[in-house]
Every structure is written in C-alpha cells, then in structure tokens.
Image (cartoon, helix red, strand yellow):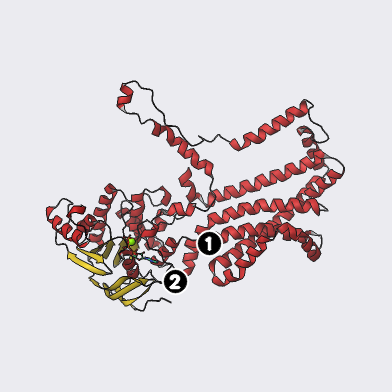
Amino acid sequence: MAPHTEQLIRSSAVQLRGLTRSFEDRTVLDGIDLDIPAGQFVALLGHSGSGKSTLLRAVAHLDHEVVGSGQLTAPERVSVVFQDSRLLPWRRVLDNVLLGLDGKEAEHKGREALAEVGLKGRERAWPNELSGGEAQRAALARSLVREPELLLADEPFGALDALTRIKMHTLLRELWERHRPSVLLVTHDVDEAIVLADRVLVLDHGRIGLDLTIDRPHPRSYRDPLLGEYRERLLAALGVTEDHK
Amino acid sequence: MTTSASTNTGTSTDATADTRAGTVTDASADTGAEAATAPAASVAVTAEDAARGRRRRRRRGLSPGKPWPASRLVGPLLLIVLWAAASAAGRLDTGAIPAPWTVLETGANLWTDGTLTTDVLTSLERAAYGFAIGLTAGVTLALASGLTRTGEALIDGTVQLNRAIPTLGLIPLFILWLGIGETFKIAIIAIVVYIPIYLNTHAALSGIDHRFVELAEVQGLSKVQFIRQVVIPGALPGFFVGLRLGVTGSWLGLVVLEQINATSGLGYMMFQAQNYGQSDVILVGLLIYGVFGLLSDTAVRLIERRVLSWRRTLSS
Ligand SMILES: Nc1ncnc2c1ncn2[C@@H]1O[C@H](COP(=O)(O)OP(=O)(O)OP(=O)(O)O)[C@@H](O)[C@H]1O
Ligand SMILES: [Mg+2]
C-alpha cells in the first residue's frame, strides 16, 4: 500500500493542499498548495534537484513508494510525456500510440493523432527508425489519443536539438489550443516556459517560490521585448543575477 | 519504506539502447553499417587544402571493414582443401586420418546398409525429446519465477543450486535411479537444456526496464496486458540467447551420453569404431554431429531474426 496518506479525488482540475514528499528524512516537497484550473497551460521551473519531477510524479500517481502527506486532486484522464520518448521498441509506431487501448475506433483515433503530429505514413515504422524529434512526436500522439484532461510533461524536449525544440514548441501549443487539456510542463529552460505557458511556477526549497501569470498573446516570439521583463523576474527567482549571465 | 522509484530525468537514456544491452547481438552486421558510412566521412577536405594540391588526408577507419560474403565458410573450406591435398599427396597416415573421400564413401556405405539411419534416428530422437522437455521446463519455470514473488522464492534459488552442480556429474545417480535405458539420457539432456533457457529468460523477465513499468502504469495497462505487451516481448531477446545455448547444450549432452553409456545411436557407432580402429567411421559420426549442430543453430537464428525483426532495423 502507498505510504503517503492523502486520498485521490477526481475532478477536472488539479488541486494540491499541503503536499509533502520526502526521501530518507530529506523533505523535497514541503507543503505545496497549488490550483491549476481546467485548461490552463502551466510551466514549472526550478533548479536541478528542486523537486520538479517529484511533484509531477506525485500528480501522475507514479510515486507509490515515496513518503508524504497532503491532499491531491487530479483529473480522471491523465497523460504523461517523459523526457525520453519511451516507445516500446518491439511495437510499431501506431501500436505504441495505441498502447492500452483497443478496438477499431481507437485505431482510427491513433491514426488521426499521428497525422496531427506530422507522422502520417509512419504508422508501420519501428521506433528505432525514428529520429529523436519524430519519436517525441509519436510520444505526444500517444498521450493525445487518450484525450487527457491533464497533460503532464517532464522536460519533454530536453533531449532535442534547439531547432527541433522550437518546432516542438509550436506543435505543442497548437495541440493544446485544439484539445485544451490542463498542462503541467516541467522544464529547465526559462525561455521555453515564457514562450509556451500562461503561467509559470518556480519551485524553490520545496515550495512554490514564484507564481507568475504571463499575459501576452500567442504565438509569442523569443525576441518579444515585453517578455524580457518576465525573464528577469524568473531568473531572479531562480537566483541568477546579472553577473551570472 | 523503500524509495526505489527513480526519477524520469535520472534515467534519460535512449530506450532502444537499454533493450539491446545485455543481450547478445550479431556484431558483424553493425560493423558492416559503420564501414559503409566511413568513406563518406573521410571526404571532408577543405577547399583550401584542395587548392594547394595537398595530399588528401584520409581518416583511418577503425572498424575491420565490410564483412565478406559467407565469410564463415572460408576457414572450414580451407581446412578441407588442406586435408584433401595432404591425403592426395600421401602425407597423412590413413589409419589415423583417412582421406575425405574415404570418409564420404564409408558414410554412403553405412547409409545404404541401414545401420547409419537407425543410429542417426535414435540420436535425433533422444536430442529432440530432451530438448523439448528442457525447453518447456525452462520457459515454464522462468515465467513462474520471473512473474510471481512466490515462484521466485520457490524456484530461483533451487535452479541456481542445480546450476552449481555440473549436470554430467549427475549421470551415475541418474543411472541408479532411472536405469541405463532411454529415460536417464533424456533426463540429462533436458537438464542441460533447461538451465541456460531458464537463466536467460528469468534474467530478462525480471530485468524489465523500470521506465517501461512506469509507462504501463501511465497508460493504464492491466496486469495481464502489462505482462503480454511489455514484459514478455521485452524478455524475448534474452530467451533467444538461452535457446541458442540450450540447443548447443542438447548436442553436447547427447555426445557425452552416447560415448560413455551407449547401446545404440551415433555415439555408440563411434565407440564401436574406436574398438576396431575404424577412424573413417568415427569421422562420419563427428561430421553428422557437426551438421546437426550447425543446422539447429541456423534454424534458431532464422526464427530469432523473424521474431525479433524490430531489432534488425538498427543493424541493416
Ligand atoms: N527515488 C529517490 N530516492 C531518493 N532521493 C530521491 C529520489 N528521487 C528523487 N530524489 C531526490 O529528490 C530531490 C528532487 O529530485 P527531483 O528529481 O524531483 O528533482 P528535479 O527538480 O526534477 O531535478 P532535475 O531538474 O535535475 O530533473 C533530489 O535531491 C533527488 O536526489
Ligand atoms: Mg527532473
């Protein structure tokens, strides 16, 4: 049985109350309170080791063996995109997308999702034959096909090159606009957070140190000078001062 | 209160690399692919260099180069040619090493008078029964111990213990228990076969990548779906490693059993020939063992290539 004590309550949005998680007496999450309304695109920043993945895994209910307490409310249908595409190498791309689903209708949706991420025609390819970006797009299709109310992503573009990454940003934003799930995107990259998200959180010492709503229209450009101000504030919250840059 | 759950970011390795590791793959195919791309890389010469008419510095390729077609046959064929040449030149003692054509002739004679057929069939039957039982036992035990904690507690330690005892050392005991007939021979072969199949399949089943377990949870797979769609396909490469060792093991067991405790079969034929100093008959026996070994290994390879076709995409 799970060592943490909170009950999972199903709803269309995410609600955390006093969420704690610790590893061997080291408290990584220290009483997090957080509400994510349905359909909001949230990015989560923080130093390496600050507990971003721990938070995401708690929301995804993947942390069976981690000690903690608090209250956690999450939607029924949650999809997760990992940093690696995590495609099963022995299943063809379409079968990977359909993992855990069956039936003719699911197959139809799977093909549609692949077309949406630009992988039409690659349904019968083996994952080994895909490039890093293509594999990550297949992983996106796999998470979309279940029509998630909440999409959790832990540095999904961390392993991609800069060019592919920018394309993936556009794609992710488009997909979000079409399907409108709530998104919690963990990232290291301040610019990625600013360009994509409507709200950026900074995790610091086990708590949400900064909760910033980014009120700029989409699509956003990296060069938008008005975004610079947000960047400054986020970098300051992350403890990066002018001389570090 | 264990904290074994690893984080996503800590294990950001490529999924395919993980599944390939720990299993024996055919290395020759990979080096072939590298060799094909090597010349393309070495053409990187600057325009300046070319203008000065400098000699192109070719980057030295470190891979052994393209594999030759049917290269595995070269060594054996050369041996046969040397053997035939030496025999024809009369440089070999025909009593110890008869000429290749003598061996073929003896084989043909033994075949036409029917003794060879009976011996071969007896041997094949033993190997087939032993192998079938060993395969079934190995796979069943590996599934039981790889998929359930009870099974692991009961089976794994016991098999490890069994493995520590050299199986051929069990022969005297098995003769006492089962008599010197067919049963004990089949039992010994089955043991020789089941151990590598069990060990490799069990290791593959229990070594399932933790990231795939997480994925299955996220995708809401049931326990049965998880085992059928993730665990078993992921364990197949390991199973095939065990299978190939098992096939080799079945022939090895057969040869040993037939040479020391035979009343019929190929080994018996060779044993008799030793008493009468018929080295050509011994060579016929060895030749047949060799052909069987080669054929069965090739069969397993072909099946493996078909079943694990998803892995070929990297090397070909
Ligand atoms: N299974 C575990 N056992 C012990 N400690 C752990 C475990 N998982 C995470 N931790 C610790 O918890 C802290 C937070 O880890 P987490 O993976 O959440 O960080 P992160 O913010 O995602 O870092 P990164 O940006 O590097 O991915 C780290 O100090 C880490 O060492
Ligand atoms: Mg992390």
Q: What whole-number distance in Å separates the C-alpha atoms at marks 2 and 1?
A: 22 Å
Type of amino acid under label 1:
Leu
- Residue B225 placement (x, y as % from top left): 47, 66
Q: Looking at the image, which residue sits at the far left? A: A226
- Residue A129 placement (x, y as % from top left): 41, 47
Q: Local crowd at mark 1 within 10 Å, few (<14), some, or many (≥20)? A: many
> Considering only order in the chain, which callout, 1 or 2, is on the residue closer to the N terminus?
2
Q: Front-most of B59 and A77?
A: B59
Q: Is mark 1 within 8 Å of ligand 1?
A: no
> In screen coordinates, is B145 left or right of B1?
right
Q: Front-most of A241 and B186?
A: A241
The quarter holding residue B41 reads top left
Q: What is the chain letter for disc 1?
A: B
The quarter holding residue A68 reads bottom left
Q: Is residue B172 above or below residue A12?
A: above
- Residue A89 placement (x, y as % from top left): 45, 54
Answer whether residue A108 is visible to the viewer in this image: no
Q: Which mark is residue B2?
A: 2
Q: Local crowd at mark 2 within 10 Å, few (<14), some, or many (≥20)? A: few
Q: Secondary structure at mark 1?
A: helix
Q: Looking at the image, which residue sits at the far right? A: B276
Question: Where, quadrant-wise, is the N terminus of chain A in this rendering?
Answer: bottom left
Q: Secondary structure at mark 2?
A: loop
Q: Is residue B26 above or below residue A47?
A: above
Instruction: Give ligand 2's quarter of the image.
Output: bottom left
Residue drawn at (78%, 32%) of the image: B99
Q: Is residue A182 above or below residue B124?
A: below
| Circles 2 and 1 in contact, beta carbons < 8 Å | no
- Residue A106 placement (x, y as % from top left): 37, 62
- From the image, tell me which residue sits under label 1: B205
Between circles 2 and 1, the one closer to the viewer is 2
> In screen coordinates, is B141 left or right of A178?
right
